[in-house]
Image (spheres, helix red, strand yellow):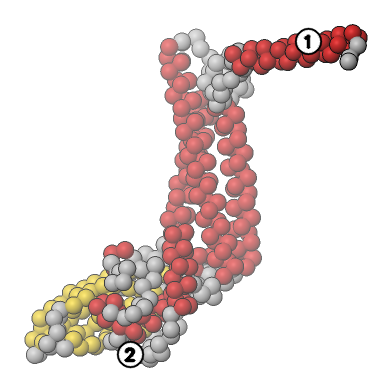
Amino acid sequence: MAGPFTLITSLLGTLCHSLVRGTWLACTLLMLMVPPAHSQTPAPNPEIELQALTQERGMLTAELDQYKATVRLIQTDGRPPEQSGNPAVRRLALEMVKIKERLIVVTERELTLLQEQITAARALAAASPQYEVADGIESKPLRVTTPDYSMADEQEHVERLRTLLASYYAELQEAARTLPSEEELAARAAAQLEAEQLARIPFSADKVQLSGAEGSTALSQITRRLTDPDIPESRRDIAPICGIRTELFGALIASEQRSLRPVGKNNYVARIRLQPGDTTLRIKDKRWAIQVPQNDNAGDFLVTLYVPPDSPPELHLFAVDDLLAEDNPHIPAWLPQDINLKSRAG
């Protein structure tokens, strides 16, 4: 049986524990009831954001200049880096495009903030004639605090930023005429996996009119070219014009001109509709002849053209229905959407 001293000690310990626990709970509830100080996110400071943007633009510009200097050391034939035969140079060109895209985002935001500040300063000056733009008051809208500041200086800075933006956009547009987009690169990679699994069906490069199986192989060859890092890119704003003439029993029954879509690395494609008879396709001074049986109906054909820099052009043509009739046709992801070529199995 416990003695009096032991009982008193136990009771005191329980009481102290209850008091401490109660005090902690009370404090906790009080902290939950009282909102924390500075709980609201402070409004962004345009001055700080402008400084950060200016600093980032400077870093990006320095990085871009370093890339350009590296390209000049490697690329010595005068060609644009996007069209270089050196895969390393083309990779540098892709990185420069990414930097220019970021520079556009940064410069546009910087330009917007400056224009907003100029507009606010003009409105405040109109409302308060005695207001000094270079005043040191905390609520001033403009970021420049030096006594010799003038709105003309700020407007001149805006014009410089506009000039920079125009040059960035022009350089990106020029690069886009040659370099594939990120989506196109992903489509090429997806098509490469399919092409590697496709059984290779040999056919002569000089053969123009192909079967469905041969057409599948022709498309897989283009896929291999597009994914070959050793083959340089070609300009994307050049579309060869193909003249198409069809005769039946010696009489001209169809004549048209179609432009072929560039898909990269001097490869072009088009979907055309041909009538039965003898058809001649002409691109510049080159001619190719095919024949659609007279008892056939008019049908859609896919034309592929490869124009290597130092070799004769290679043109193939095959019926879309013949290609889709194959068990496992190669229908690459890089084909333009308006070709509208989908596997029947899909």
Which badge, 2 or 1, is on the more N-terminal residue? Answer: 1
Judge whether residue 285 can be spotted in this image: no
CB atoms at circles 2 and 1 under 8 Å apart? no
Residue 105 versus residue 132 in the image, above or below: below
Residue at image position (63%, 45%) is 59
Q: Which residue is mark 2?
A: 207
Q: Position of residue 174 (x, y in %)?
A: 44, 58
Quadrant containing the N terminus in the rendered view: top right
**214 with respect to 164 (left or right):** left
Q: Position of residue 10 (x, y in %)?
A: 84, 13
Q: Considering depth in this image, is 36 or 280 the residue closer to the camera?
A: 36
| Identity of the residue drawn at 61% across and 53% down | 65
Quarter location, residue 316:
bottom left
User: Within the image, what quadrant is residue 239 found in?
Assistant: bottom left
Q: Which mark is residue 104?
A: none
Q: Amino acid at mark 2?
A: Lys
